Structure formats: C-alpha cells, structure tokens
Amino acid sequence: MKRRTLVIIVAVALLGLVVATAASILHDGLSSRATPSRFEIMMARNVRHLAIPSNARLAQNPLLVSPEDLRDARLHFADHCAVCHANDGGGQTMIGSGLYPKPPDLRLPETQSLTDGELFWIIENGVRFTGMPAFSNGGEHGGMQDSWKLVHFIRHLPHLSVAERIEMERYNPKGPDDRAEEQQENDFLNGATPQRKAESQDHHQE
Ligand code: HEC
C-alpha cells in the first residue's frame, strides 16, 4: 500500500514536471538563459527529494565543526564550486547564470532547509540533468571527508565574513592573464618591478 502511494506520488510529480517543462519550452524555446517557473522549480525539487534515498537523507554529519575544517572547506569551495556558485554561494557567476537550471542561492531557506544528509548526497552524486556535477569520483576532491566539511561550510555561508570572502578570491581558479597580473603585483611588492630590472641589465651590458 505504502509503495503504491509512493509510485502514485512519483508518477504525478513526473507528469507535472513533463507538463511544466513542455510549457516552459513552448514559452522560452530551449534556451538555457531562461528562468524556470516557480512551478517547474518546485516540481524539480520534489522529484529530486524523492530520488535521494531516505537513509541518505537522514545521515548525520560525522565531523564536528572546527575552524580548521571550515577553512579547508572554504578554500575547496573557492577552488571547485565557486565557478558556478560564487564565493558567497549566491550563484551570480558568468557560468552559473548561463546554466539551466541555474545554481540556487545556497544561503536561502530552500537550500538551508535541506538536511545535512541531503546536502552531502547532492555533493557526492550531483544532480542529474543539471550542471551540478558529482564529486564522489575522486580527483582533487578528497573523498567523503571533504564533502562533509563542505556541508558544514554550506551551513556557514549565510554568515560568511568579508575577510573570509576576500581570502577565497585568492583560491579561485585563475587564467593566464590573472596569473601574470598577480606575478607583477608580487614582483612590485617584493621591491623590484620587472621593467626596472630589465633596464638596469640593459645599462650594464652597454
Ligand atoms: C558546473 C557548475 C557547478 C559546479 C562546479 C558546482 N555546482 Fe552545485 N549546483 C549547480 C547547479 C546548476 C545546481 C542546481 C541543480 C538543481 O537545479 O537541482 C547546483 C546545486 C547544488 C546544491 C543543491 C542546492 C539546492 O538547494 O538545491 C548544492 C548543495 C551544491 N550545488 C553544492 C556544490 C558544491 C559543494 C560544489 C563544489 C564541490 C558544487 N556545487 C559545484 C552547478 C554547479
């Protein structure tokens, strides 16, 4: 009986999603620049909620919050997540705003009301049919520990300080231009501007 109810709920949710998606495609075409309707967002969240196994949803964070772990997670977020989610979790980035669905503002109640287990599951498994990647398959992401630390960090996002955000900027992935600029700044701060060095060498050779 319970199983049947669940099947009916899923069927209704999927049907709703199909209708909402069809309506939105008719309205906006297939552009990912469009903003999903509230109904579409609600249906997508409900389907996702059902897709996360209930024991995973109830999982407790095995790590206690510590300043060291929070810092680790903050820098990790700056390096791997901020391209889409922005350092402050607001989602206002060049990549984020071009995705459909867009990354939600992680500081708002919609995200903060998810359980620790749900946040962990989403980080580990990603969200299918969206830009949210799964991070459980290793790489620089150091396994479950890192994901649980990130869960603590997501809880901290609504209280992120300006100093913390500025520190994160140093850990955002950089392109060659940013690196060159940073190198120049460092050279300048170390007292020798590259041009002067070059000049004095020239004089020496003459
Ligand atoms: C390539 C872009 C991208 C990257 C990189 C990315 N995300 Fe996401 N993320 C998304 C999108 C898009 C969604 C919205 C998915 C949806 O609509 O269900 C999302 C959703 C989420 C959610 C669910 C929020 C909610 O309320 O539904 C969490 C939590 C999250 N991301 C955490 C992270 C963390 C932590 C990282 C880094 C380890 C990360 N994301 C990296 C694009 C990204």
Image (spheres, grey):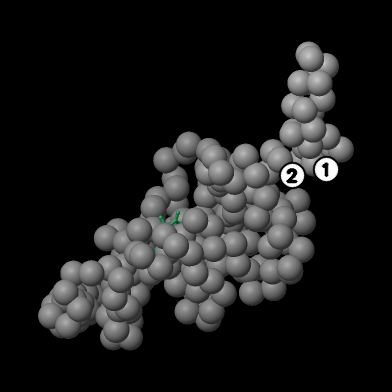
Given residues 81 and 117, the one toward you in this image is 81
> Where is residue 22, by image quadrant?
bottom left
Counting every numbered tag in the picture gives: 2
Asked if the residues shown at circle 1 and circle 2 are in contact, with their CB atoms under 8 angstroms apart, the answer is yes
Q: Is residue 33 above or below residue 146?
A: below
Q: Quadrant of the C terminus?
A: top right
Q: Is mark 2 within 8 Å of ligand 1?
A: no
Given residues 162 and 60, the one toward you in this image is 162
| Crowd around label 1: few <14 · some 14–19 · many ≥20 (10 Å) | few
Residue 44 locus on image (x, y percent): 30, 74
Residue, x 32% and y 78% (percent of image)? Answer: 35
Given residues 93 and 19, the one toward you in this image is 93
Image check: 125 left or right of 108?
Answer: left
Q: Quadrant of ligand 1?
A: bottom left
Residue 129 locus on image (x, y percent): 27, 60
Residue 114 in sight from this viewpoint: no
Three-letter amino acid code at disc 2? Glu
| Crowd around label 2: few <14 · some 14–19 · many ≥20 (10 Å) | few
Residue 48 locus on image (x, y percent): 33, 69
Residue farthest toward the front in the current orientation of the protein: 206
Q: Which mark is residue 123?
A: none
Question: Cα distance, mark 1 to mark 2?
Answer: 6 Å
Residue 69 locus on image (x, y percent): 70, 52
Q: Which mark is residue 185?
A: 2
Q: Which mark is residue 189?
A: 1
> Callout 2: helix, strand or loop?
helix
